[in-house]
Image: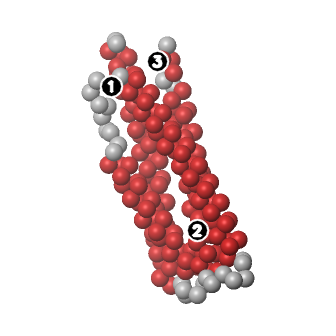
C-alpha cells in the first residue's frame, strides 16, 4: 500500500477516535449532571414521594454512565496503531457503529420498561406504587436521552465511515 494511503488510513482512524471521544465527553457531562442535580434533590426528597425514587435512580444511572464513559476514555487511541490496514479500519468502524446501534435498541427497551412500571403502579393491589412511578419516570428520562445519544453517535460514525469509502476502490 502506498505511503499516502497509509497516512490517509491513519487520519481517518484518528478522526473516528475523536468522534467517539466527543461522544464520551457528552456522556460524561450527562453522568455528572445526573450525579449533581439528582444527588442534590434525592438528599432533600421525602421517601414517600415519587421524586425520591426518581432522583435516586438517576444517581444510579449517573454512576453507571460515568463508569462507562471512563472505560471508553481509557480505550481511546490518540495515535494510530502501527501497521494499521484498511481492513482494520473497516472492522473498527463497523464495531463502533454496531455498539451504538445495539445500545439504541436497549434504550428503547428502557423507555418501554418505564411505561410498564408506570402502568404496573396503577394496579390497585400494588404495595409500592410510588417506587414504580419514580423508577418508571427515570427510565423514561435516561432511556430517552441515551436513545438520542446513541442514534446521534451511530449517525455521526456512519457518516464518517462514508468518507473513507473511496479507499475501498
The residue nearer to you, when weighing 2 against 104, is 104
Report the side of 60 relative to 132 (left or right).
Answer: left
Above/below status of 144 relative to 88: below
In the rendered image, which residue does mark 3 sit on?
A: 167
Residue 136 in percent (x, y) is at 62, 69
Based on the displayed image, in which of its 4 quarters is residue 115 positioned? bottom right
Residue 114 in percent (x, y) is at 63, 65
Based on the displayed image, in which of its 4 quarters is residue 76 positioned? top left
Task: Find out whether the residues at labels 3 and 2 contact each other: C-beta distance under 8 Å.
Answer: no
Q: Looking at this rendering, what residue extends furthest in the left direction?
A: 82
The answer for how far apart the CA atoms under marks 2 and 1 are is 42 Å
Report the side of 122 relative to 5 (left or right).
Answer: right
Residue at 38 percent across and 17 percent down: it is: 5
Residue 32 visible? The answer is no
Q: Residues within 10 Å of mark 2 (few under 14, many from 20)?
A: many
The answer for how far apart the CA atoms under marks 3 and 1 are is 14 Å
In the rendered image, which residue does mark 2 sit on?
A: 138
Q: SS at mark 3? A: helix
Residue 157 in percent (x, y) is at 51, 37
Q: SS at mark 1? A: loop
Task: Find out whether the residues at labels 2 and 1 contact each other: C-beta distance under 8 Å.
Answer: no
The answer for how far apart the CA atoms under marks 3 and 2 are is 44 Å
Q: Residues within 10 Å of mark 1 (few under 14, many from 20)?
A: some
Q: SS at mark 2? A: helix
In the rendered image, which residue does mark 1 sit on?
A: 84
Amino acid at each position: 500500500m502506498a505511503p499516502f494511503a497509509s497516512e490517509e488510513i491513519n487520519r481517518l482512524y484518528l478522526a473516528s477516535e475523536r468522534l467517539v471521544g466527543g461522544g464520551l465527553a457528552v456522556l460524561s457531562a450527562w453522568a455528572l449532571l445526573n450525579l449533581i442535580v439528582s444527588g442534590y434533590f434525592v438528599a432533600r426528597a421525602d421517601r414517600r414521594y415519587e421524586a425520591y425514587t426518581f432522583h435516586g435512580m438517576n444517581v444510579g444511572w449517573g454512576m453507571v454512565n460515568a463508569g462507562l464513559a471512563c472505560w471508553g476514555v481509557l480505550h481511546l487511541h490518540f495515535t494510530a496503531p502501527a501497521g494499521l490496514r484498511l481492513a482494520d479500519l473497516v472492522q473498527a468502524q463497523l464495531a463502533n457503529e454496531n455498539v451504538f446501534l445495539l445500545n439504541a435498541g436497549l434504550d428503547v427497551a428502557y423507555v418501554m420498561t418505564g411505561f410498564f412500571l408506570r402502568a404496573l403502579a396503577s394496579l390497585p393491589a400494588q404495595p409500592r406504587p410510588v417506587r414504580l412511578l419514580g423508577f418508571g419516570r427515570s427510565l423514561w428520562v435516561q432511556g430517552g436521552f441515551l436513545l438520542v445519544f446513541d442514534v446521534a453517535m451511530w449517525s455521526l460514525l456512519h457518516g464518517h465511515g462514508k468518507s473513507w469509502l473511496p479507499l475501498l476502490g
